[in-house]
Amino acid sequence: MRNVVPLVIAFVAGVTMMLALFVPVLQPLQERASVWFIILAAIAFLIGGTNLLLHHARKIAQQEAGWGFSAVTLVSFFITVFVGLAKWGVPPSDAYPNHPWSGNYITEGAPLWWLYQYIIDPVTSTMFALLSFYVASAAYRAFRAKNTEAMILLGTAFIVLLGRCSAGTFLTSWVPESLEALTFPGATAVIMAVFTTAGQRAIMIGISLGVAAISLRIILGLDRSYLGADE
Amino acid sequence: MRQVSKLLVAISFTASMWSNGAVAAPRPATDVTVTDRPNDAGTGLIVKWTLSPDDEESAGANRVVVYQIFRQVNGKPSEEPVAKLNAGNNEYSDSNCQSDAHYQYEVVAVAEDGETSAIATHAERIRPVVQWFDSSRTWVAVIVIFVCAAVIICTELAKHGWSTYVRPIAGLTAIDEAVGRATEMGRPMLFVPGIMDLDEIETVAGLTILSHVGEKAAVYDTPVEVPTARSLVMTAAREALEGAYLAAGRTEGFDEDRVYYVTDEQFGYVAAVCGWMSREKPAACFYLGKFFAESLVLAETGNACGAIQLAGTAESAQLPFFVAACDYTLIGEELFAASAYLSGEPQQLGTLKGQDVGKVLAVVLLVCGSLLATGAMISGRDSLAGRAHDYLMVHVLNKGVGG
């Protein structure tokens, strides 16, 4: 019974959103639904924040594997929340110089700004930079010529990689302009514009139809697995 | 002598006035017309005018540089202009109207020195009209109705015993293998439902698969770890997993602490999940949802742990990474078909048949478009094939003719 209300909400919201695409009068409802979702997500963040605290506190208490990271997480969490909420070190705004909390919490030079600028940003960039090593290791495995398909993939990748760097341009610079498609950059352009685009479009058409089908299953209540058990 | 000096002062004063442009104002815009903006909910009007004769380089000091648009709402004029448009523009679309008010617009040409022209306006006040159907999307509506009808009809047919064979999807049949492997090895499984919120259909698709994975895990009593990057997803994942354990009759095996929120920050989430993988060495990893740059980091870490990996996303840019690093990948539509496939219910499988009807329509449009484009190339844009191609591009697909 507890799933009936979510199913009704899913049906009404789904049909309304679909109609809003074609009925201009309903379009404000579409925008309002987005606002409601943001409000819901903001409230849910309290649940998430509480869960974060409890989860890491339990790990520390039970000294599970990696509990030291949990301790760092909690300390960082409390420092960030305190610095942000208390607007610590934020100068008052020009409009209200007598009100100490009137400044913008991300004012340049303030501690919260400093935390983002000198800790979160570099750490995030470091994680992102690791991607290059993972690309190399994944490419090494993917391009091993173990069968015909892998050999075709390897050959295509070789052409595209060379076509995208100056070495490819240099190596085939002697090819006359009339045969540009035979140069590395020319062949790369053909591969990307014809083969890759065709493949991607096929996937996109499949995805669009898949989205339509799963949306209908959810709107019509055929697929309820995401709601959990109906007690 | 005194008379001459007075004359000189008068001449210099007149000359300075002339050089400042204060002597002559620019000529006004003309033929102001206001029409209703089509296909909206009565929120827009379009104002058009003929450019001022002084809206050209040769106009000298009187050259118009800006048109100011003033608006009267129910006879009440605005003090500030609602828009300022550079010279050369002769159209303004006002998107901030209400269908129950009457509007009148005034166009004022402004010269470089700030001198303003006389006001140009239109005769009658106008009220925006509410349109109940967006006619520019007629063909989209036809296609949507066709696909939806096909899905619903196939679902109904399947309910009444129509055969619904679906080809085996390797990635989905591998779920049993992955759960079995984790059970044999006595290690946990990892399920990542993407990094986006519940308003993404891929996240919902991922959660539907989680409930099937959870059911298998409950039967074999194998723990499933579900770190989430969004609070709402955590709540929904807990519900889905609890339901799965209930369906398997193993409610006592459900541990809600294994479904937890990590952070909204993309790479913070990746760091936490990869750290857990390195420490716990999961036997099976599932990545099903919406992914971006973190896809390869997660999949490569799982690979390094020796886990059997199943991934699925509709992000075409991330698919090659998953294909390279995972054992099985659900490509695009397979992710959305997964819950229907795994449920085995005829009516859910019927929706997949309806999807196939949509694919037939896509193929027909592709073939027709290709033939018409070829015909247009051979016989020219003005030929029947050329015009049909243009109609297909502009009205059916809502694209430019060149596209």
Image (tube, coloured by chain):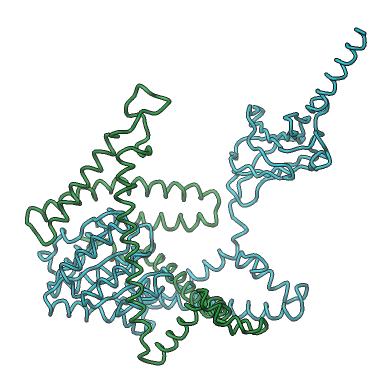
Chain colours: A green, B cyan
The reply to whether residue B151 is in sight is yes
User: What x and y, as percent, mark residue A17?
Assistant: 46, 55
Query: Residue shown at 76%/37% (left/top)?
Result: B64
Q: Is residue B124 above or below residue A165?
A: above
User: What x and y, as percent, mark residue B263?
Assistant: 27, 54
For the C terminus of chain A, the quadrant is bottom left
Q: Quadrant of residue B191?
A: bottom left
Query: Residue shown at 9%/60% (left/top)?
Result: A64
A53 left or right, relative to A110: left
For the N terminus of chain A, the quadrant is bottom left
- In front here: A142 or A222? A142
Q: How many marks?
A: 0
- In front here: A167 or B191? A167
Q: Quadrant of residue A150?
A: bottom left
Q: Is residue B37 above or below residue B180?
A: above
B241 left or right, relative to B142: left
Query: Residue shown at 27%/37% (left/top)?
Result: A85
- In the image, farthest residue toward the left: A62
The reply to whether residue B159 is in sight is no
- In the image, farthest residue toward the bottom: A148
B295 left or right, relative to B261: right
- In the image, farthest residue toward the top: B2
Q: Is residue B81 above or below residue A33?
A: above
User: What x and y, as percent, mark residue B297?
Assistant: 31, 68
Q: Is residue B226 above or below residue B186?
A: above
User: What x and y, as percent, mark residue B162?
Assistant: 39, 82
